[in-house]
């Protein structure tokens, strides 16, 4: 019987419960599933690629047919390189459909032998996205029900560092303006 290897490409910045749900579903229908993180230098990511990889590896440790990898360049080239016959993508709502359809058709144009398989995550994750998780975390909102515990922990650490950095910058700016006020010679009134 033919074995099917699939690639699940994405940014995963950060990985969410929705991603995990899809990995779980994908691992049931594919013989092998590679979760492939795009190292995209154009975007300013919250987490580095190695950090995202570590989180995804921990999240998928219990699935023996799932591996995690990183790639640059075209997804179809990566999939061909690792011998995959399918791409896995999630569709949460109609709003995802247009972009996903365009990408799937373009990928098919680039690599006709590669099929894109769409799966739907559980309804409870239909509103969940990495972008919203980042935004909620940045403003101190509750993220525990949106991401695995390890990711929640990493997000909190990131936000603590960011806040400390912001506090230090404010203190520095205030100190600079005080010094400037104190040492800058006042203009004489003529
Ligand atoms: O999680 P995301 O950000 O929705 O994933 C998008 C991703 C990584 C699947 C897409 O941007 C992609 O495939 N990028 C690699 C470059 C590429 O192949 N572009 C052409 C797509 S038709």
Image (spheres, helix red, strand yellow):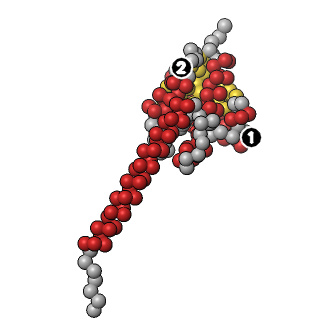
User: Mark 2 vs ligand 1: CB under 8 Å?
Assistant: no
Query: Between disc 1 and disc 2, whose residue precedes?
Result: 2
Rendered image quadrant of residue 63: top right
Q: Is the residue 182 above or below the residue 171 in the image?
A: below
Quarter of the picture containing the N terminus is top right
**Residue mark closest to the camera, 1 vs 2:** 2
Q: Left or right: where does residue 111 sit relative to residue 157?
A: right
Residue 17 in picture, x, y percent from top left: 62, 32
- For the question of whether residue 90 can be seen, the reply is yes
Circle on res. 94? 1
Residue at the spot 29% in from the left edge and 67% down from the top edge = 179
For label 2, the crowd category at 10 Å Cα-Cα, with few meaning under 14, some 14 to 19 and many 20 or more, is: few
Looking at the image, which residue sits at the far top? 1
- At mark 1, the secondary structure is helix
Residue nearest the observer in this picture, 88 or 12: 12
Where ligand 1 lies, by image quadrant? top right
- At mark 2, the secondary structure is loop
Q: Which residue is mark 2?
A: 61
Residue at the spot 36% in from the left edge and 63% down from the top edge = 174
Q: Left or right: where does residue 72 sit relative to residue 98?
A: left
Cα–Cα span, label 1 and label 2: 32 Å
């Amino acid at each position: 019987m033919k074995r099917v290897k699939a690639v699940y490409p994405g940014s995963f910045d950060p990985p969410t419960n929705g991603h995990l749900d899809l990995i779980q579903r994908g691992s049931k229908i594919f013989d092998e599933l590679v979760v492939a993180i795009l190292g995209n230098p154009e975007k300013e990511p919250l987490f580095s690629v190695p950090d995202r990889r570590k989180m995804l590896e921990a999240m998928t440790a219990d699935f023996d047919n799932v591996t995690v990898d990183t790639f640059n360049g075209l997804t179809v080239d990566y999939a061909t390189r690792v011998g995959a016959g399918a791409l896995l993508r999630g569709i949460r709502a109609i709003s995802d459909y247009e972009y996903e359809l365009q990408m799937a058709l373009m990928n098919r144009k680039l690599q006709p032998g590669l099929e894109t398989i769409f799966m739907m995550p559980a309804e409870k994750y239909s509103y969940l996205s990495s972008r919203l998780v980042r935004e909620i975390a940045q403003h101190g909102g509750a993220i525990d029900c949106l991401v695995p515990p390890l990711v929640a922990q990493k997000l909190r650490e990131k936000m603590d560092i960011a806040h400390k950095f912001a506090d230090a910058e404010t203190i520095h700016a205030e100190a600079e303006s005080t010094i400037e006020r104190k040492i800058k010679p006042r203009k004489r009134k003529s």
